Each structure stands twice: as structure tokens, then as C-alpha cells.
Amino acid sequence: MSQMQKQIKLARRPVGTPSMEDFAFIEAPIGAPSAGEVLVRTVYISVDPYLRGRMQDVKSYIPPFQLNEVITSGVIGQVVESKSEHFSKGDVIIGNLGWQEYSIANEREIRKIDPTLAPVSAHLSIIGMTGLTAYFGLLDIGQPKEGETVVVSGAAGAVGSAVGQIAKIKGARVVGIAGTEEKCRYLLNELGFDAVINYKKEDVPSALEKACPNGIDVYFDNVGGSISDAVFPLLNKFARIPVCGAISSYNKVEADMGPRVQTALIKTSALMKGFTLGDYSDRFKEGGAALATWLNEGKLKYEETITEGFDHIIDAFLDLFTGANLGKQLVKVADIE
Amino acid sequence: MSQMQKQIKLARRPVGTPSMEDFAFIEAPIGAPSAGEVLVRTVYISVDPYLRGRMQDVKSYIPPFQLNEVITSGVIGQVVESKSEHFSKGDVIIGNLGWQEYSIANEREIRKIDPTLAPVSAHLSIIGMTGLTAYFGLLDIGQPKEGETVVVSGAAGAVGSAVGQIAKIKGARVVGIAGTEEKCRYLLNELGFDAVINYKKEDVPSALEKACPNGIDVYFDNVGGSISDAVFPLLNKFARIPVCGAISSYNKVEADMGPRVQTALIKTSALMKGFTLGDYSDRFKEGGAALATWLNEGKLKYEETITEGFDHIIDAFLDLFTGANLGKQLVKVADIE
């Protein structure tokens, strides 16, 4: 195997919103697996807002990407050649692998998925990372109770749409905030949200007040910024805020300033807690099983925006910051054979 | 009893920092108790930062003071005349009573205190409201573990000094932030804090970094504002922030702006939770017993700043916002007879 393949490396650290020039497309040899390794053909690549954080050289829950190294994220692939007794040619696997057409993966960094359980791509979305993020953030931190009001921002995104549906399953009244009429219609008509707010067309503070006549008990925060600011005056006593993402500030060069939250938290005895999926790694089995059950019962719908072709990975990544995607953003690089 | 007494009413709602003109000193008849009531002579009045919030006409955890009504707060008094079978003349009682020389109190809104357990005034401070606030906020939300770093702002205040000492009892390393050299020396030399920062003399972000080489696990927030802003970059994974007070913003007329906290919370999976003492009313007995034990074991010290005379209540209240007081601020109105 001395064939060449395409890879994407971080060429420089983005300042503000990332652009095509921050990335380098490289040709490199595919290589061959050693003992305990497999050669994997990349099938789907997950592009996610959190990757923006890893492009900065700052301390965080995972180390930053290094310059001139291949970028990594969630990948589904198919085994082409195996030097591991745990994997055979043709196995469909998932792991955190490189943005490249082929990967040499150690047997310990990948796991097999069952392609009969759900469409393969769902393992990167509704029953995978994004579904689990919604599941643990909402249920462990948000703890919605029947009849309570749950507000979710980034509601048409992969995490947000799962959050809203799980909150409905738990009997809550769900208000979604999204940025296009199409997304709002989808939340209302397809996913059964009780109310929606188009933050690009409506004044969020007054629209929220109207949509939440009984106040807000849970706010699942995917966006931060001024949308989240509008939530604090409406919090009920003992409200809970799972803080999952702050996409509005990921590209800010200056400090992201807003009204301080302390007084609102004191007035309501509210709880705000950041989290990342890794905090719940010992409970993935529980979460995955619950999500698969709801999916198969028809209680959980999901959308994917699938961009075709390795060459369009960066376009798909940049689209995350313009709100172009509905549901989980994936890039399809190859077919399963 | 048709004698006259002095009362203090809210004359107008303060804008920004309260001033003497916001209050009215009134002469009014003392009155006489009916069945189930007692006449109480005011002995100590507690003046607290949270009262500033009640002077605004906004929704909060307790209703705002009404204009031209007598202001109320924690009061220790002595029964002068009883029409209740539960109280006798001479009993020392505690309750939420008016800023006036005498009160007619219903038997259900006051309770007897044991003047032999600790100095009477301690029931308004270290084994009362302020000690309990420290106890529940730190132990229930902050949950300090042995060897962890606990930072407390407003550290020389009544709540802050109890927080630091309880954290020491639990084996934590304690860093206090206060605003005078005298307060800092007191925390270091008298209360056994491990490090102190004088926020009026030092650059808080760099001083905190130096004082917390292993990061911050618990931040007990009494002040909000720019002091609290400096804590977020130093939070450790799974840090906890009990949000108790935001004295720096109580007098702000404009929105209190600062760096948004969402990104820091996500990076560290940190928890931030507002609370008020009332959230723990079903556990006061547990807390009071623990505090009295530590007090009698000599593990818990406390200071009171006692202003003498009814006419100086407003001075004492205004002093809270200039950082003049060390420990609990009380006003002594009369002696126990």
C-alpha cells in the first residue's frame, strides 16, 4: 500500500471566524497497519462546533490541535485490512480519527458498530455523540419534570433537536430558539415543539416572555451570547441550566461581554453547569440504549445534513458558524462496500 | 402603652448607592399586644447587604419592601409584655422584625434563644443567619475536599470568614480576598487562611494565579463583579461556585456587564449555583448544631462590628457598601435587662 491519499491539516490558528486559508490539503502515503492495527477507509466525518475550540492554543478539557498535524474528529469507517484479531475486513467501526481518506488505527481506539441497529451515520448523531450529549446534559443537569418549561437554543441543531424531543418524552413544555423559518417550522411541525422563536426575526427577550408565560425551569444552552442573556430574567426558582455550547463566542477575538449572571442566579437559586460528553463516559451504554429504544419506537426523529466529498469538509465546517445546517452536519467521504 | 417610639421607613427607592435621604425616621405609638402576641423591646438589629435588593421593586426570592413601611431584618429582642402562653416577660427572642424600638410580634414569627449557648448577638451572626449561610453554601454546593483550593471573596465579612474557617475544618487550602490590610492580616493571623489578596492594592488576576498554583476547586462568591471575573480562568475541572452575594452590583443602575462565563464553565464542567438561606430551612437545626459545636471547640472564630444606637442604623447599613465592617454588622439598640 504505497498509494497516496488526501489529508487536512491545521495550517495556522484561526483568528475570529475560521477561513479556508487556515487549513492545508496535503497528499500523503496511506501506509500499512502493524500488529494490533487496522487500515480503515473513511466513510463519514463528523464536523462539530467544539472543534473550533481545539484550534486555539489554550488549556481546555481536551488538548488543542497542533499546527501541521491532521485534524481529528468522530469518524465512521470500514476496515480494509486488519492486523488485529478483534477486527475483520469489512467491519464498520467508529473512533476519533483523522480528516483523511484512510487511517491506520490502533485496535484500542476504535469500536465496531452494528449497521443493522440504525443507519450507520446515526452512530455519529442521534444514537452517538450528539444524542448522548443531549441525553446526559438534559437529564443529568437539566432534570426536567412533567409540566415544566424547557427552553433550548440552537434548537434545530443536532444536539438541540434531540434535547427538545427528550424533554417532550419527559412531559415538559418545550420552546425552541432557531435562526430560520424553515428550522422553526421543522421544530413545530415535525418534532412537536410547543413554541419556537426565530432569533433573527424576533426580539428574543419579548418573544421568550410571550412563549414562557410560566417562566423557564430548564434552559439548555447551546449558544451563549445575547440569546442566553435573555433567559436569565425569566428563570424560575431552582431553574437548571446545562451549558453545552457557546457557539456565539467561539469566533470572538475580544472578550465576550454580557450582563453578569450572579444576581439572577441568587434571586432564583438557579444552577448553571458546564459539561462535555466525556464527563459521562461510564454511562454511554445506558444512554445509547435509551436513545436507540426511543428511535425505534418512533419517539425520536433526527436530521442530518450530509455534505458529499472529502474536498468539502472545510465548507461543511465553516457552515456551522453561519447556521446553514439542519441537524447533525456530516461529510460523506466514501460508500460502505 | 401609649408611649411613642422611633421607626425607620423606606421613604423612596434608592437609585444606585443608597443614601440617608432614602429613609425616613418616624415617631409612632408603641401599641399593645393582643392575644397570641408579645411586645418586644429591640436589642440588636442585623443590617445586611441583601436588604439593598429588597429596596428595589423587582421580583426576587422575597417580596420588595413597600414605600412608607417599616423596614424589617433579623432582630434580637426581649419580651416586655406577653399575651402568648409560649413567651414570658424577659425572654430573649429572635425574628424578622421592624427597624423600630419596640415591636408587636405574633408568637409564630419569633422563637426563644438560649442566651447561655453563646453571646446573644451570635444568634444573628456565627450560629445564626450568616454562619448558616456559609455552612450550607459551602458544604452543600461547594463540597470542598481535603487538599482542594477554596477561594472566598468578601472573606472578612460575616459569611466569608465563616466560609474560610469551615473550609479549613474540612482540610482545604483557603485563599481569602478582602479589601484592607487589616482585614487581610486578620484572615491570615487570626483565622488561619493560607493566603490572602487585598483587591484594592493588588492586581487580582495575577495575585490569584500566584495564590492558587493548583487552580481553584471551589469559589465561594460573595461579591460578583470584576473580582469574580478573575476566578473563571483558574477553575479546575469540576469546580463548584456557590453564588451567595453580588454586592458589587447591588447599587448599579445600568446592567452589570462582564465577560460571559459560559465558555469557562464548559471547559471545566464547572457548576455555579445561586442560593439563599431559605433554601435550607428544613436543615437549620443540623447546621446550627454543627456551628455551635465548632464554636465551643474553638474551631470557629467570629467578629462583629457593633454600632451603638438606633439613630445609627442607616450609617451602619451604608457602611456595608464601603467595606468598613469587619465580620457581622449589627446595631445595638438597647441592653438586655
Image: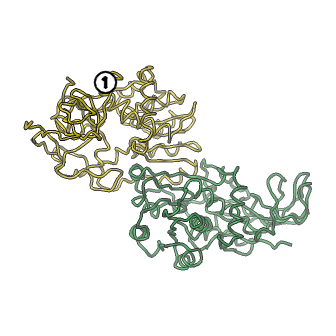
Chain colours: A green, B yellow
Where residue B227 appears, as percent x and y from the top left, is 41, 42
Location of mark 1 (residue): B115
Q: Is residue A324 left or right of residue A79?
A: left
Between residue B130 and residue B283, name the one nearer to us. B283
Between residue B303 and residue A75, name the one nearer to us. B303
Between residue A300 and residue B162, name the one nearer to us. A300
Disc 1 packing (10 Å; few <14; some 14–19; many ≥20)? some
Between residue B296 and residue A48, name the one nearer to us. B296
What kind of residue is marked 1?
Pro
Q: Is residue B168 left or right of residue B99?
A: right
Element assignment for label 1: loop
Q: Which residue: 50% across, 40% down?
A: B140
Q: Is residue B310 visible?
A: yes
Q: Mark 1, chain letter?
A: B
Q: Is residue A315 visible?
A: no
- Number of dots carrying numbers: 1
Where residue B293 appears, as percent x and y from the top left, is 45, 24
The quadrant in which residue B3 appears is top left
* Above-or-below relation of A109 to B90: below
